[in-house]
Amino acid sequence: MLLAARHKAMKELKKRLPYIEDGVLLSKLVAYSSKLAHSCVEKAGMLGFVKMRQLDVDEDRKLGLIPFFVCGTLGTTACCSFDNVAELSEVCSRENVWLHLDAAYAGNALICPEFRFLINGIQNVTSINFNPNKWLLVNFDCSLLWISDKNLLTSSMTVDPLYLQHKHDDKTVDLRHWGIPLSRRFRALKIWFVLRTYGIEGLQDQIHQHIKLARLFETYVKNDARFEILGKVTMGLVCFRLKGPNSLTAKLLHMINESGKLHMVPALLSEIYVIRFAICSQNARDEDVEFAWKIVSNEASSLLMERENIENGICTEKVGDGDQKNPDIDDVFPDFDDEIIFDQQKSNLHRARLRRSLFMRMVSDPKCYNTKVLKALCVDKKRTRSTPSENSTELDYDK
């Protein structure tokens, strides 16, 4: 969708500004998403050679950037939060900006009438997608896309050499113009079989069952004073943590996964480390949730007891020839310090910025990809280093 939105924006800009080169216009385009949008949104920006922002639009407009694409999210991966579709729709419609809704997970729940309030204001949305393989009993991979005007997509993807042309354009949809691949699998058949086998009521029951199980787990967590829940449980996901520093929850998750009985993944919500308990199995039942909670509770008890013993100086460890000392809690949990967790997060973000920077510079800065220019710059750099002077300046490739 981002590539199609970029094509639309560039086409409109070239009409208004025909004297400006494509590379200059492209370097001004900027897309937006929430901080909890899926990683594929950022990757789309990298592949589309456009800036991807999680910042206020006004600041970028002051810098001369051109907003062209907004990705809203219904049910974020981290915590299943929801963007306000009505507000986004109003702003994007007023500013002539492409609004895409990523409803990969929670969009499946829209088959249940009680959840359709989540898409109030959808009438001005340009495109929306969701993945039946995430929650509608369809095996991977399967993604459904709706777009308000198919020409917005096909005009950006059409490549029509003579050997691919035919006379049946008016009789069928030629899906080779709907995406990057020329050929594609027959994914529609498995959706058809699921719909025929379960029907709308069967699929609704599946959604309701998973939400019921998530709320059962939520009840277990709320009844244990050692834990807390972050965010509202609306779908089949519960985000919870041990009260205390992030390192405590990180260590707990490590112990749970190492047990081999249960597997969960973490998320950072406003710099708070949480564990994600997601109901995924088609055959999950109440006893499965109870089993999972017992593992969480038992591992938490072991962790907190170990922590208490260390703080009270009860635990000892051998040092040298029979000598003993009381271990420090940081020595026992060295890989789960709060600072380490955030340093890793900052390091990942820094690497991502460097990758985005390289992609962006390749569009507007020829020294990044033109071998002749690179060679000339390298020679000049060597000369500068060999004959330094007070007025000489060295090229900084990191800027």
Image (cartoon, rainbow, N blue to C red):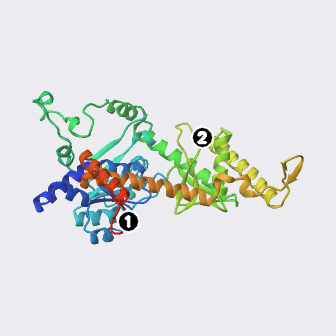
Quarter of the picture holding the C terminus: bottom left
Residue 141 image point, x, y percent? 39, 36
Residue 272 image point, x, y percent? 57, 61
Left or right: 239 as drawn, with respect to 160: right
Give me the C-alpha separation between circle 1 and circle 2: 42 Å
Q: Residues within 10 Å of mark 1 (few under 14, many from 20)?
A: few
When the figure is inspected, residue 282 is found, relative to residue 212, above or below; the finding is above
Q: Nearer the viewer, residue 57 or 18?
A: 18
Q: Mark 1 against mark 2, which lies toward the viewer?
A: 1
Label 2 belongs to which residue?
285
When the figure is inspected, residue 355 is found, relative to residue 184, above or below; the finding is below
Say what secondary structure mark 2 lies in: loop
Q: Residue 55 shows which numbered tag?
A: 1
Say what secondary structure mark 1 lies in: loop
Residue 267 image point, x, y percent? 54, 54
Q: Residues within 10 Å of mark 2 (few under 14, many from 20)?
A: some
Q: Is residue 119 visible?
A: no
